[in-house]
Image: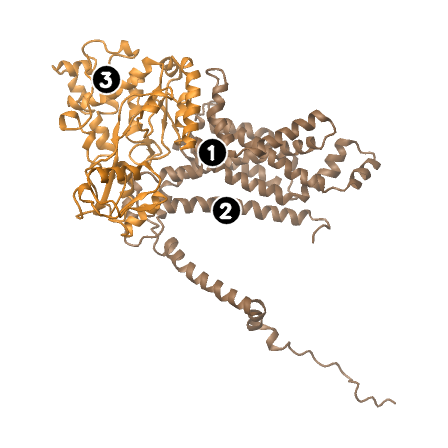
Amino acid sequence: MKKQLITCAMAAAMASTATAAFAQTLAQVEERGYIQCGVTEGVAGFSFPDENNNWSGLEVDFCRAMAAAIFDDPDAVRYTPLNTNVRFETLSNGNIDVLSRTTTWTMTRDTDLGLTFAGTMFYDGQGFIVPEGTVESALDLSGAAVCVQSGTTTELNMADYFAANDLDGSNFVVYVTRDEVTQAYLDGRCDAYTTDASGLAADRTQFPDPSAHVILPEIISKEPLGPVVRSGDTQWFNIAKWTYYALINAEELGVTSENVDDMLGSENPSIRRLLGVEGDFGTPLGISSDWGYRIIKHVGNYGELYERHVGPNTALGLERGLNALWTDGGLMYGMPIR
Amino acid sequence: MTDLSFVRGEIVGQRPAPRRSTGAVAWMKNNLFSSVGNTIMTVASVLFVLWLIPPLYNFLIGDAVFTDPEGLRGQACRIEGVGACWVFIRARFGFFMYGFYPDSEIWRVNLMFAIGIVLIIPLLVPKMPFVRTAAVLFFVVYPVVAYFLMAGGIFGLRQVPTGQWGGLTLTLIISLIGIILSMPIGILLALGRQSRLPIIKACCVGFIELWRAVPLITVLFMAAVMFPLFMPRGVSPDTLLRAIIGIVLFESAYMAEVVRGGLQAMPRGQYEASAALGLNKVKTMGLIILPQALKHVIPGIVNTFIALFKDTSLVSIIGIFELLNTVRAAGSDVNWSSPTHAVTGYIFAAFVFWIFCFGMSRYSIYMEGRLHTGHKR
């Protein structure tokens, strides 16, 4: 925690000097010919090198979408893998233009570090995994031996959740490392274990029989993961933000990478505006007016990205849940392009 | 008087040594069961090996998955009681070797290493011809050729930014540059530290004490993250270059202290004898002192080299994809996920590191043997 504080303080100190210097990100990016995108060093489904050694994943596709919007070329991205300790500093010092790296949107990060979150690509949160057929809901876990990593917010969240729902939390089993927790669960020493849902899904792919384990539907904490840009460059922030909204609006309007060419002739004014057929929504962002079309054509809409990288048909097998469109009871809500 | 019947006329033939002192039984008795303590140690060691070998064998070979006839990827290693998932290593071997380097350009990396090996052989093997030519080529021409082979951008070679370099290639590049540069800088620092000129001495002492006192992680962090903030906007040297410079400076401080140890072992008489021969200071150092001093500290130097080679894995914290990082990242591909693929990756990485470190260690022992001139105990 202390280390984090120091890191934060350093980033904040840097940010205050850096903000003014980086006002023209778009101009720099266009001159350079590619976006510099900060990603993880390998997190299943979010950003990892695939079998052809290309970066792939939900958050990688966000950078590809930005590149498509600006250059009409989703491959105009160079990836910088970053670990948690250096991610904000690397964004502040200008070595990357956008950080799309399983970063939780919190107030401190949004306000204190000179950085701004552009949206939420994935609503993650703490969940529980249990052997198939034991319990259906986290509310049935009263008195269960739940394994958890010690000294983490995960542990505190779970204690809070059990207390708030009047469950018996006296049988928690605490381990120091994540691997120990997983092993204890597989050895049958606990009935369930808990960490972020995306982490549970990634762990599950390594189990001898992944299909014998289910992630319970309850998500008990807020971990909104989203792309981050530097504060102080409104234009660049807007490009990131509206790239994000375009992905969601496209899904809502039923525009996919396959039918986008047909949709150019659509009568629906929302689709026409999204694809740049009607009105000029490129000039305010400083990019071509068909930026929406380019994103959908090259990368796809949010639903496609989700299905491609983390959805039920992938190895991760995560249900849409909170990440469904608002019309389907989720939280994904794209501001209207008008 | 001549009847000394107790004097033998002929020599008694040699008899074999007592059975109790030769043969396998005696060897075992002498070496394995010579005392109660040794007997206990022997039995315990045998039990330990017996306890260790079968599961190790089963994991690494017996239950391991070597081939994947059906192309099942992660599924291939998802069987009951599976051992090492070698098929994962086979599938991602190219990534571990070359990182993100484009497939079509990999011949350039191979060519670079081939040239390097051809040039370095005369330098490492004694009594080879063309040593001087090879030395000039290796230390002066080769770095330039190697850089342009890797980075491209001239003679129609496609440009490959350093962000795409990776894997074992990058580990070797970083450690070779580190080893080759830290040695001369270290020697200069060590000599500077012994200098009678106060400013030179102070600078060298200051440099060594500063760089030796900070952890390598801090150096890398400063180089990767903080350094760009001190530079004017737009001027941002390559991350890899910054990391390599950091490593070279850090290791040369260590090297300087190793060399200083050798210098201090030289008796004063050597300097005086050299002076008596009429050699000037440079010649004294180059011909008399340094050759002896360096020979004394070969173990220390190689120790530093090996440490440096292993320390290169620390650059992974600033997002440089050396061998260990490629192994870790490839393991996060869910298509390959299985109970053992990650462990197998780490075993592979450990094995590769071990091969190189063991090679350096054996070569150093060979050099010590070759150079020993009467100091050996």
Query: On the rendered structure, is B278 left or right of B196?
Result: right
Which residue is pictured at 68% across the width and 32% down the height? B193
Element type at mark 3: helix
Residue on which disc 2 sits: B355
Inter-mark Cα distance, 3 to 1: 39 Å
Q: Nearer the viewer, mark 2 or mark 1?
A: 1
Say which of A303 and A212 sits in front: A212
- Say yes or no: labels 3 and 1 on the same chain: no
- Say yes or no: labels 2 and 1 on the same chain: yes
Query: On the rendered structure, is B31 left or right of A327?
Result: right
Inter-mark Cα distance, 2 to 3: 52 Å
Residue B57, given in percent of the width and then of the height, sits at 40, 57
Q: Quadrant of the C terminus of chain B?
A: bottom right
For chain A, give the colour.
orange
Residue on which disc 3 sits: A292
Residue A43, given in percent of the width and then of the height, sits at 33, 35
Residue B254, given in percent of the width and then of the height, sits at 60, 36
Q: Which chain wears brown?
A: B
Q: Chain of mark 3?
A: A
Q: Is the C-beta separation of discs 2 and 3 under 8 Å? A: no
Task: Give the amino acid at mark 1.
Answer: Val
Q: Give the number of callouts.
A: 3
- Picture disc at residue A261: none
Element type at mark 1: helix
Task: Give the amino acid at mark 2.
Answer: Ile
Inter-mark Cα distance, 2 to 1: 20 Å
- Picture disc at residue B315: 1
Element type at mark 2: helix
Query: On the rendered structure, is A55 left or right of A216?
Result: right
